[in-house]
Image (cartoon, rainbow, N blue to C red):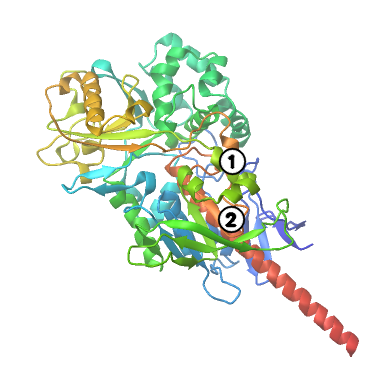
Amino acid sequence: MAAFVLQWPGSGESVRTPRRRSSILECRGRSSCYGVRRRVSPRRWTRTVCRPSRPSPFSLCCEKQDAFRLVPSATELLRDAHGHIAPVRREDGGRPTAVVIGAGLAGLTAAIELADAGYAVQVYEARGFYGGKVGSWQDAAGNHIEMGLHVFFGCYYNLFDVMRKLGVLERHFLPKEHRHMFVNDGGRVTELDFRLGGIGAPWNGLKAFFTTEQLPLLHKLRNAVALGTSPVVRALLDFDGAMEQVRALDDISFSEWFRRHGGSQHSLERLWNPIAYALGFLDCDAISARCMLTIFQLFAVRTEASQLRLLIGAPGEYMLRPMVEYIEQRGGRVVLRRGVRELVTEVADSSATNTSSEPAERIRGVVLRRLPSETADPFVPADVVIAALDVPGMQRLMPDVWRRRYRYFDNITQLKTVPVATVQLRFDGWVTELRHGDPVKQPQPPVHGGRGLDNLLYSADADFSCFADLAVTSPADYYREGAGSLLQCVLTPADRYMPMSNEAIAAEVLQQVYRLFPSARALQCTWSHVVKLAQSLYREEPGADRLRPQQRSPIQGLYLAGSYTQQDYIDSQEGAVRSGRLAVYAAVEDALQRQRSGEEEEEEEQRRVSTVGSRSG
């Protein structure tokens, strides 16, 4: 059996280890980061495995690697001993081709990684805009419309890494004050204030929860008991060990876990439900304990994890366009209004069975939906196909025979989704200024004349559990001279709003805004827009995590990306970016595996011929 070298960095020690197909892409063990195979010669590969290195939990910003830091770029697999990257090549020496289905965050991230690894990339998007659930566009009047409210936690390490590579992180992603603000009926504003004079986690988190006015003292104490008996405490010293405990809590809801550990119903309703709605569009009775405790663990250990950023303007312009330009500059194409109708496969090995460790099928390419000017559905060949779709999109694309043949695909059919509606309301004045309420001091001067609360806002007293005044938080596209606030409100749960007309939804939300901000009753709503998504995030309910697919599918050459696929973070923008990177890492790893197998077979054939020749002589 062929082998690769397992070597500890800096130790000079190595162990010959049988090479086997890698089945776990993301670190789920006790080590701090991925091992990375490096090419040290045309015929020799080394896997470097980093020793566990846990940073002090009391530092302000931990820069070490672990399961919640950066997913390794696929180009690390291609880097030789001198640091040079040798792009992936086909057997004939040509440039391999890749098709990415879907131009959301996962698809665009995958396309960037594929282009960097040497693939000729084509991205096909059925809609007329890129970005998927984070997409945006302009209407005829120039108003920027968004699919949802997009907020970026400080633990979005992979998303920030991509934006840093594109050169837009610090210019386009505006950090907000380190506090989470709650707006209650009558304009009463409370907060989780994480600011503690430069002192970081976990102390700033303890200060935030013990000083918040969102909960009475008794419920703060019960809250402390619940969290104090959670895996979060272990995470201060053993992050990965705590994550193992968190993963094991996927079978119960957060509210069940919270009450079992002494937490109160009042805390769930006034504090945790708005946060759960913002994270997964579900309340604490419906969302998995794994989902919520994952976030709490990050907040407890990482100072930056709880700090929020918002884009300076619309995501289509300030986050997605730089990604598309990067892909096109490297020879890739992003094609809008061009959906994929079918995946085309062929038999990879006639002796393979459904129970074999090797796939019985391999991808050949995709069939596009024909345009009105075309007489047939075009076929696009590809060495690699990455299906970067949401749950309903993937469910529609999968052939029925796959669902019967592979549990991998059958599990996807069992995933459920949640509805969400996003409402934008433009006013002729400033809603969150709280002129007659209890104004929150703004330590910085207003941006471009906008006035109000410059942060993400939560509420336990409205159907929109989270919202923001984009004219204040994201002024580049949303502030208008002579106009006022532009509230963007996320309705969760949105089940009862789905049958309603857009006008009725906007009117209902407007009344709730007036209830939260009595000082805004004199203001007029001058424009509104509603976006409904009947199937949005996958439903992160208890037991759903086991249904999420790994990025490497049973079909050779087909990989799945999307925030619903298996990765430790929740269904989110960070989860989408992580999944795109993981999918390409798997694709490049498999390509190199086949390349090495081909080289070994060639060497074996040469040895056989040489042996036969020597015997003949």
Q: Residue at x 62, y 41 (%)?
A: 28
Assign the C terminus to one quadrant of the image.
Answer: bottom right
Q: Nearer the viewer, mark 2 or mark 1?
A: 1
| Residue that sits furthest to the front in the current view | 375
Q: What element carries label 1?
A: helix
- Counting other residues with Cα less than 10 Å from the Cα at mark 2, is it few (<14), some (14-19), or many (20 or more)? many
Q: Which amino acid does label 1 sit on?
A: Asn
Is 272 situated above or below 334?
A: above
Quarter residue 290 falls in: top right
Is 585 situated above or below 535?
A: below
**Circle 1 sits on which residue?**
411
Q: Which residue is drawn at 39% across and 14% down?
A: 215
Is 251 situated above or below 139?
A: above
Quarter residue 408 falls in: top right
**Numbered tag placed on residue 586 in the rendering:** 2
Q: Distance between the residues labelled 2 and 1?
A: 20 Å
- One can see residue 42 in this view: yes
- One can see residue 457 in this view: no
Residue 561 location (% of width, % of height): 50, 50
Q: Is mark 2 on a helix, strand or loop?
A: helix
* Foreground pick, 272 / 303: 272
| Residue that sits furthest to the left in the current view | 482
* Foreground pick, 520 / 311: 520
Assign the N terminus to one quadrant of the image.
Answer: bottom right
Q: Which amino acid does label 2 sit on?
A: Ala
Horizontal relation, residue 531 to residue 365: left or right: left
Residue 10 location (% of width, % of height): 66, 56
